[in-house]
Amino acid sequence: MECDPSAFSQQSMYKLMIGAIVPRPIGWISTISPSGVANVAPFSFFNAVCSNPPTVLFCVTSRKGETPVKDTLHNVLTSGEFVVNIVTAPLAGAMNLTSANLPPEFSEFEYAGLEMAPSVTVKPPRVAASPVHFECVLDRTVPVNADAVGGATVVFGTVTHVHVDDAVLLGTDKIDPVKLQPVGRMAGMTYARIDTLFELERPVLPKVE
């Protein structure tokens, strides 16, 4: 198949992209509302940006029938803070529950039966059962056709504190993916776990005389 994106519907392009760009890490983002309600929601357009300063991003997509601004984005814009909680296999069911579109006055922590843990440098709480957390302050937001269905607001956050459970550590600065058991996002209702790992050595170019 060959296609011109402009000739495809937004929904068809979405299906092609999320089916091909896999597996995607999940940003389980916890925030706090101006009235103090703790919110947590998963975002499958999430990744690291750089390590100096340590920066992450997640994308809040615009979908038909939703309020103009999602609770997560509203909370980040008003508080300037959020926490990334890494999703692991034992937490997949709870993560899925937090994807429910609850009213702003309801907490997804309570809905999913998740215990909260206090953060060190920001006000939003952490998912206590997650083995890795990145506390973040808002760096900037970048709208990409954010007012249209299928558009998004890209949220950049500077990491101000990191929590890592010693049980998933290798040495002092590496994480064992087997012990972490991360969950990746596929398309539709499908998720992925890491079952097989393999290594490839970096190529070494021959010296040119």
Image (cartoon, rainbow, N blue to C red):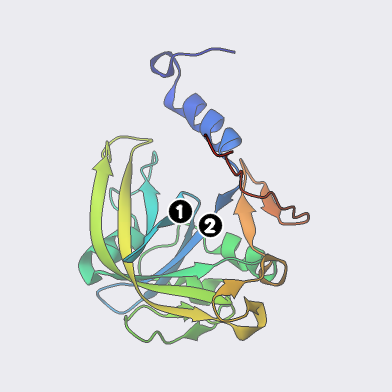
Q: Position of residue 140 (x, y in %)?
A: 23, 57
Residue at image point 48% right, 86% down:
117
| Mark 1 surroundings: few (<14), some (14-19) or many (≥20) residues within 10 A | many
Q: Which residue is disc 1 drawn over?
A: 46
Extreme residue toward the front, this view? 209
Q: Which mark is residue 26?
A: 2
Q: Which residue type carries mark 1?
A: Phe
Which of the two residues, 8 or 155, is positioned nearer the viewer here?
Answer: 155
12 displayed left or right of 82: right
Q: Quadrant of the N terminus?
A: top right
52 displayed left or right of 130: left
Q: Earlier in the sequence, mark 1 or mark 2?
A: 2
Q: Position of residue 66 (x, y in %)?
A: 37, 47
Q: Looking at the image, do the residues carrying marks 1 and 2 touch, with CB atoms under 8 Å apart? A: yes
Q: Which residue type carries mark 2?
A: Ile
Which of the two residues, 16 or 150, is positioned nearer the viewer here?
Answer: 16
Which of the two residues, 127 or 156, is positioned nearer the viewer here?
Answer: 156
Measure the alpha-carbon separation of dots 1 and 2: 6 Å
Q: Position of residue 132 (x, y in %)?
A: 54, 74
- Dot 1 lies on which element? strand
- Residue 158's place in the image compared with 4, above or below, is below
Q: Position of residue 190 (x, y in %)?
A: 67, 46
- Residue 79's place in the image compared with 99, above or below, is below
- Residue 207's place in the image compared with 26, above or below, is above
- Dot 2 lies on which element? loop
